Image: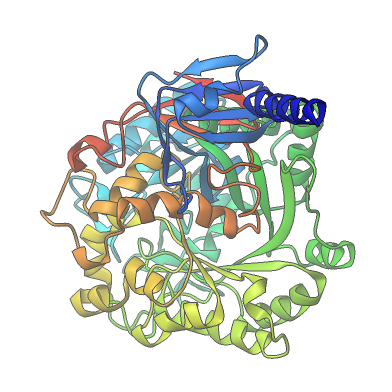
Amino acid sequence: MKNIYLLAILGIFLISCSSDKAEPADLIFTNGIIYTVNESQPTAEAVAVKDGMILAVGTTEEIEKHKSENTEVIDLQGETMTPGIIESHAHLMGIGYNKLELDLMYVKTYDELVEKVAEAVAKAKPGDWITGRGWHQDKWIEKPEKMVKGFQTNEQLNEVSPDNPVYLSHASGHAAFANGKALELAGISNLKGERPGQVEGGEIILDELGNPTGILSERAAGLVGRLIPAETPERAEQALTLALKELNEKGITSFHDAGSGQATIDLIQKFKNEGKLTVRQYVMLTGTQPALLEKWYERGPMIDSVDHLLTVRSIKLNCDGALGSRGAWLLEDYTDRAGHRGHETLPMEVVTEVSEKAIPAGFQVCAHAIGDRANQEILDRYEAAFANYPDSKKLRFRIEHAQHIHPDDIPRFGELGVIAAMQAIHLSSDRPWAIDRLGEKRIIDGAYVWQKLMQSGAVVTNGTDAPVEPVDPIPSFYASVTRKTLQGLPDGGYEGDQKMTRAEALKSYTLDGAFAEFEENFKGSIEVGKAADFTVFDKNIMKVPEDEILETKVAMTVVAGKVVYKK
């Protein structure tokens, strides 16, 4: 009996010793302020990583047990770590190409735009296209003397570029500005007639004499855009490389690409195969290519369940325009343009057709809708498509932007399980002039209504719509919690009752983004067993005064346990 007793004591001792030996980690992050977006453990001091996955989360003392002689330790030096930021709506190749063309996002006047074009012409060969993006007439500090329907005209552009065709996309991507040479190549001249300037799903803006001003709204932009020489494979690789670098520097670990064709998917796959894909990609198939969709319906979704680096399981439909170009499709007239209600840029029967084909094929549908008419029409068609599917909430259909919604339609997002994929930064950029488009009542009742949507039970994700806005998540986080412009106006923010809390804003940029791509069990929060995707900030965005949020910089970006960017 005595020997049996001693053996029992020895066994307990050995078990106790072995329990103190925790599984060794490849990497430990310590000495930081860690926000996990995990309700059962909201904060932590340290995280252990093994094989690109989170091994343990806890106090410094607890994580220290996972340290071995081969463990790399990263001292966060008091900086703030969050789950990896998920950009839920932007345009991957657009970000890259924006760096290869004229970047007009920061021009403050029409004269400055013309000056940039003149500089580009001086470096170009006669006949070369001058292309760029980012101008927004409502953000200029002063307007040109001559305006037609709220836009500038192209006389000055013609003077500096008589021989080079010029095509400059609006910041929203829903209008373009072309010079006379480009219009000449497209065969666009005086357009007097019964419906002057009207194009299906768009408009050629004309002056009082019927002459084109150079502004091409919505689908009319394609009349000139299609003439621009196709991109080369080499330039596409350069653009993707630049885009990924930008995302790494801005703390983005996952990216929802809002509408691409097969060539882009193949290029991303090539980068993955070559080990150059440093941001996880969730690609929406462009709805502008029906033949492409038919091929994918037959093939079915491409879900990367191994590396989680490239998944294709959704379809993007462009259903109306933007408020800036007065292309958003409204139920009532624009306040600042009587008789005009925007454009239905895609026949609504296409939304019905795609939805009914997508569901049995296993695809999510993501429909762009900014105006209240577009949101209502899409919800109607989603609801009809869901009727034959009792588990329709599992489909996670989305409306991209959901910027202006009729009050009667707000509860429908939660009821139908439709995700509102919104971009808080649009509030900061657009709200000062959006009231001119919609009037005060429509703004208050249904524009940028984040809290109303969340209270309906809807999931609201966050992002930037880059290159419409810079892809930096910090300004969008700031807009989420303040509802102010980036200049800090007005006091209390616009419609302050719709502000997100900081916890809600962080969740919209992490776990909710993961949910919107069916990956909430793999990423989006700092929990054991999830991907080691982290963003580290040099300030505590959850605690610093509001006016310090915009001073915050990304200090480090980690994807699958690998540091892909360090300041």
Quadrant in the rendering for residue 108: top left
At a point 32% along the width and 50% down the height, the residue shown is: 502
At a point 31% along the width and 34% down the height, the residue shown is: 540
Q: Is residue 158 visible?
A: no
Up the image or down, 333 lies above or below 190; here it is below
Looking at this view, name the residue that lies furthest to the top.
69
- The N terminus: image quadrant: top right
Q: Position of residue 165 (x, y in %)?
A: 53, 41
Q: Specify the color scheme.
A: rainbow
Up the image or down, 305 lies above or below 472; here it is below
Q: Is residue 243 visible?
A: yes
Of residue 16 and residue 460, the one placed in the foreground of this image is: 16
Q: Position of residue 179 (x, y in %)?
A: 45, 47
Quadrant in the rendering for residue 409: bottom left
At a point 58% along the width and 59% down the height, the residue shown is: 515
Looking at this view, name the residue that lies furthest to the left.
491
Up the image or down, 381 lies above or below 171; here it is below
Q: Position of residue 479 (x, y in %)?
A: 29, 51
Of residue 533 and residue 431, the one placed in the foreground of this image is: 533
Looking at this view, name the residue that lies furthest to the right.
298
In-image side of 187 versus 352 (left or right): left
For the image shown, how many numbered marks are present on the structure?
A: 0
Of residue 143 and residue 462, the one placed in the foreground of this image is: 462
Up the image or down, 230 lies above or below 233; here it is below
In-image side of 86 versus 431 (left or right): right
- The C terminus: image quadrant: top left
Quadrant in the rendering for residue 382: bottom right
In-image side of 378 versus 13 (left or right): left
Q: Position of residue 512 (x, y in %)?
A: 51, 57
Of residue 77 and residue 347, the one placed in the foreground of this image is: 77
At a point 27% along the width and 60% down the height, the residue shown is: 499
